[in-house]
Amino acid sequence: MKTQVAIIGGGPSGLLLSQLLHTRGIDSVVLERKTKDYVLGRIRAGVLEQGLVALMEKAGCADRLHAEGIPHEGTWISYGDEMFRVDFTEHTGKLVMVYGQTELTSDLYKAREESGGKFEFNVEDVAIHSADTDAPHIDYIVAGEARRLDCDFIAGCDGFHGVSRQSIPLDVRKEYEKVYPFGWLGVLSETPPVNHELIYANSPRGFALCSMRNENLSRYYIQCSLSDKPDDWTDEAFWQELKRRIPVYQAETLVMGPSIEKSIAPLRSFVTEPMRWGNLFLCGDAAHIVPPTGAKGLNTAASDVNYLFDGLCDFYENASTDGIDTYSEKALARVWKAERFSWWFSSLMHTYPNQSEFDLKMQVAEIEYLRSCTSAQRSMAENYVGLPY
Ligand code: RFL
Ligand code: PHB
């Protein structure tokens, strides 16, 4: 088989790139290790920046997002029983859209299927060859049968555990990593959200986040130990712990119900440089990871897709390599700013093992500063709604 752009990974990055390329008549094939149902079953991001919404519009996939997404003009920060609001729209003129990653991915699959998109699911042993030449190809296995995909370019959209990043030689690749000493236990429940906006809570018992998917579907997280397993937490234990970490008057109105999903995610900051090697381009979680505090993961994946899409259009439509030549540099400039914001916001909101009394005072002082200082709130709002592409 031959295509112009071979895309490894059928998550949001790979699908969005494939659909955008289709709108410009550029052919692609998506290779996905799992099944479509498996990809759609992963509960992940919930907050979309306007840049991602605009890309979904460009891809012709934004109708349901506009109909069902919930615009949020601000968010709440709580510490102890205090709570204050950071108003995104007042400070930036922008807002964010609450819309689940599962919904976005499902919209992209639907659009790709309707436009004759080419996929291979359940691919195994994906191996990238000759990425540093003008004739790269990918070998893989489906249902025991060996296959080969020849292409002009490879987009490595295969997430943190994929093969694309590993295919870049070690003497070319430099990795930067910070692992946090805690995880997030997330619960999805068919209950009305406790507040109509998100609450990020710093409490002496650890961080908590009250989020949502729609008016009868809530998503809550609590900071947990890395050694915890989801089954260690009964629903009752989860709700009681969440209530202890948010202001009393919110805890009193919290509607509890059975969890319909419960999972634990570790927290990590990670960047690999460069994001290009020859004709292989890394996109999204394949190149970088942020801790979820601040909702930057999917949104940063989208800005990579934007730069790569522009570069590929420039190549096929204007025979110019300028866009692909500057891809890594442009993408990384924005990635590092998202890394900074997620690292800052995580450091502000979590309880750390062995945190000294001085460290605790600094955290409170930083939150107090954010509460009382307009320019600090503006800075947070600018980053939360998303820095320009
Ligand atoms: P994905 O979603 O990991 O998709 C990669 C795909 O590649 C496939 N794959 C392979 N396919 C073929 N061959 C191989 N060898 C392969 N290896 C892997 C995988 O099966 C998968 O289908 O990466 P992508 O597309 O770059 O998308 C990134 C986002 O999924 C991620 O950044 C976000 O979910 C992060 N994130 C959030 N981001 C936000 O912007 N806002 C949020 O509110 C937000 N909340 C979150 C999050 C991530 C979380 N977890 C679980 C880490 C909340 C949580 C709890
Ligand atoms: C979510 O709704 O899953 C979510 C929202 C905001 C975050 C992280 C996750 O910062």
Image (cartoon, rainbow, N blue to C red):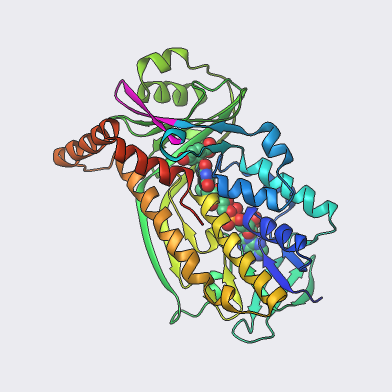
Left or right: 67 as drawn, with respect to 259: right
Q: Position of residue 256 (x, y in %)?
A: 53, 18
Q: Is residue 293 visible?
A: no
Q: Quadrant of residue 240?
A: top left
| Image: 81 above or below 161 | above
- Name the residue rendered at 65%, 72% in the picture: 314
217 above or below 324?
above
Could you say which is closer to the camera, residue 99 or residue 259?
99
Residue at screen point 51% across, 57% down: 389
- Point 60% across, 60% down: residue: 305
Q: Where is the N terminus found, in terms of image quarters?
A: bottom right
**Does the magenta segment cover residue 82?**
yes
Q: Is residue 338 magenta?
A: no
Picture coordinates of residue 382, whole percent (x, y): 42, 44
Side of 312 relative to 351 (left or right): right
Residues 93 and 366: in front is: 93
Q: Position of residue 378 (x, y in %)?
A: 36, 40
Read off the magenta span: 75-88
Residue at x 59% of width, y 84% of height: 132
The residue furthest left is 358
Residue 345 falls in which quadrant of the image?
A: top left
